[in-house]
Amino acid sequence: MSGSRGARKKKGHGEDEHPDERWMASYMDMITVLMCMFIVLYAMSTVDQDKYMALRNSLATGFGQTEVGKIDTASGTVVAADDVTPEGAGYSTGTETDMSKTAASGEEQTAEQAAAASTAAQAELDDLTAIKAAVAANLEGSGLSSDVEFAVDARGLTIRLIGSETFFGTNSADLSGTAVSVMNAIGPVLKTAGHDVSVEGHADQRSSTAPFATNWELSSARATQVLRDLVERGGMAPDHIQSVGYGSSRPLSTGTADADLAANRRVDIVVLSNQSDAVSALLPQLEQAAAAGGGAVTDGRNPTVQQAADTSTTAEAPAQEKPKAETKEHATEEEDSSGH
């Protein structure tokens, strides 16, 4: 019994000498975190005045502000605030042409740049005129000259198919026989012209377009039909042509007479310019100058083939002009008042 009591007393004495100390691990972690926090706070409260001034002066110099007496040793080009345009042209880099750099910076063109732009625009106008002359020659040979109009603007050459009674039935997107003949004259030229083409459908302002829901669908369907003919029969590359339907939003005439409505029912085949916007903007001015000289793309409704060829340095004039065919009978002499 006494041995048993002695064993119990010895065990109790051992527990008093080795208490549980696991709480100290958490305590030391907390002390470490607090120490780190106070070190960070101390570091943040002390500012190196010299380094701060150097940073401020460097930023001020880099942004082109008033001279601060410090030399900016950063590499690269320092652009003054007055030299930075809203488009960021002051920072432009790369292998841009002189004309594109001038246009980006908003500066006036030099005499050399203006002359280069004019030369490029004249060459583009000659190219478009040659395309027009080739199309006009094909139309003349088929007696279809009166069914097409030509126009030049900053976008390029527009070949305009006027009057839905000539090319489409009332409220229909199916090409008529006359339209097929016209496309036969246009397609081979555009196939090899080297220009992108936009086919744009239009309708007059009247709203009765059944079976089409609106003028948008009608004009889009007509443009798509012309596009398909140019691609499927004319061999035009699909990645160089698009179709757009404008409905009645872009009329040529605001009148309500039959002639006005017929002018607004049209499909425009736009041969897009290959030049930049700055060069293409000169095309209307050069075309007007050509018109004053008696040889423009839009001279008359459709000038004779010889006249058209004279305006181009690349188009070949036909040996002999064929007489125009007699006026054709249209499938429908006058559309119904609800037709488009």
Image (cartoon, grey):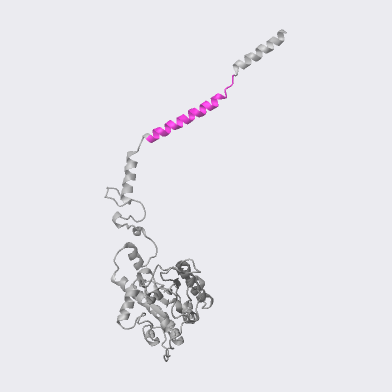
User: Horizontal and vertical percent for residue 4?
Assistant: 71, 11
Provide the major secondary structure of the magenta segment.
Answer: helix
Please state the extent of the stretch shown in magenta in the rendering. 19-44
Residue 240 can be seen in this image: no
Residue 43 in the magenta stretch? The answer is yes
Q: How many marks?
A: 0
Residue 96 sits in which quadrant? bottom left
Quadrant of the image for the C terminus? bottom left
Q: Quadrant of residue 54?
A: top left
Can residue 36 be seen?
A: yes
Judge whether 11 appears above or below 291 on screen: above
Foreground pick, 157 / 220: 220
Image quadrant where residue 272 sits = bottom left
Is residue 268 inside the magenta stretch? no
How far from the left and from the top, in percent, is residue 251? Answer: 38, 71
- Residue 28 appears left or right of 282: right
Spot occupied by residue 293 in the image (x, y as percentages of width and height): 30, 82
